[in-house]
Amino acid sequence: MLPIPANELNGPGTLGPYWTFYHAVVAEQLRQWLPGRPSLLLDLSGGRGRWPAQAARAGHRVIEVMDFRRSAEPWLRDASDRIQKVRADNLGFLPDGCVDGVIAEERVLSVEIMAESVIEDVARVLRPGGRALLCVDSLVLGMAILAEQNYWAHLCQTGEVMLIPWPDGSITRCFTSQQIRELITGAGLEVEWVRPRTVLSPSTVDHVLSAESKSLSWLVRTELETEADGDDTVGIHLVASARKPM
């Protein structure tokens, strides 16, 4: 699906139809992942996503951590009957084994360079049998950004940890499917699955939606039925599901 200019990635840009499709895929993946019974969930997306509201509508209670690891002053506020917003720089305010699930969308494990520390916190607060949904930048994305900036030497020198400088000066961490598996198992969690978030290209999505605007649900269904477990050759993001052993 690449190359895509860096200013189009993770934002609206001019690829409006693709991002509409992308967010529909995320919403459906989350719907399928959410527990079947009312549960207590922790959202680490930093207030950057719509996922706490979706989980709340499905009957779950959500603790939404705002600006994860970026604030010195913790605070708590009820945003609704089911969503409690918390500003904190770590998860020390939560006891061990207190939540049924953790949602780490919006690439939080890539934005937070020390992903090992984050995933260890996730494993600590999960109850036995609890699950985590994780999204990270992929190696494909990282290599595309380096190539776009003419960092050809860096492409030949990528080590186990791939830190990518973005044109806006920020840095994110990119993962292969094997690396995200190792991150999960290193924290004592079990990998349920790892796959690219999307495998359909922006051009394919744009072509189909321009031909038939009502085909979005068909595209999403096609995407989620595509066998792409562990494929590192497509997709700007990887998504993984993990479980804490009983």
Image (cartoon, rainbow, N blue to C red):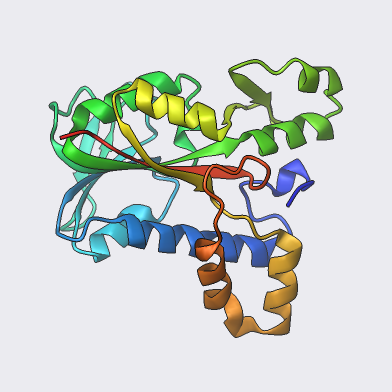
Residue 219 pos. (x, y %): 58, 72
Q: Give the quadrant of the C terminus.
A: top left
- Asked which quadrant contains residue 108, the reply is top left
Q: In the image, 201: left or right of 194?
A: right
Q: In the picture, residue 44 is in which quadrant?
A: top left
Point out residue 38 in the picture as x, y percentages from the top left corner: 14, 58
Q: Nearer the viewer, residue 216 or 223?
A: 223
Q: Eyeballing the image, is 133 above or below 245? A: below
Examine the rendered structure and indicate whether residue 242 appears above or below residue 110: below
Of the pair 83 and 165, the residue shown nearer to us: 165
Q: How many marks?
A: 0
State whether residue 163 is above or below residue 174.
above
Rendered image quadrant of residue 53: bottom left
- The relative height of residue 163 versus residue 24 in the rendered view (above or below) is above
Q: State the residue at coordinates (60%, 80%).
A: 215
Q: As drawn, is 185 to the left or to the right of 126?
A: right
Q: Position of residue 14 (x, y in %)?
A: 74, 59
Q: Report if residue 73 is visible in the image.
A: no
- Residue 104 position in % (x across, y down): 38, 40
> Which residue appears at 20% of the width and 57% of the height?
80
Give me the residue at 74% from left, 41% from top: 6
Q: Is residue 120 left or right of residue 41?
A: right
Tell me if residue 162 can be seen: yes
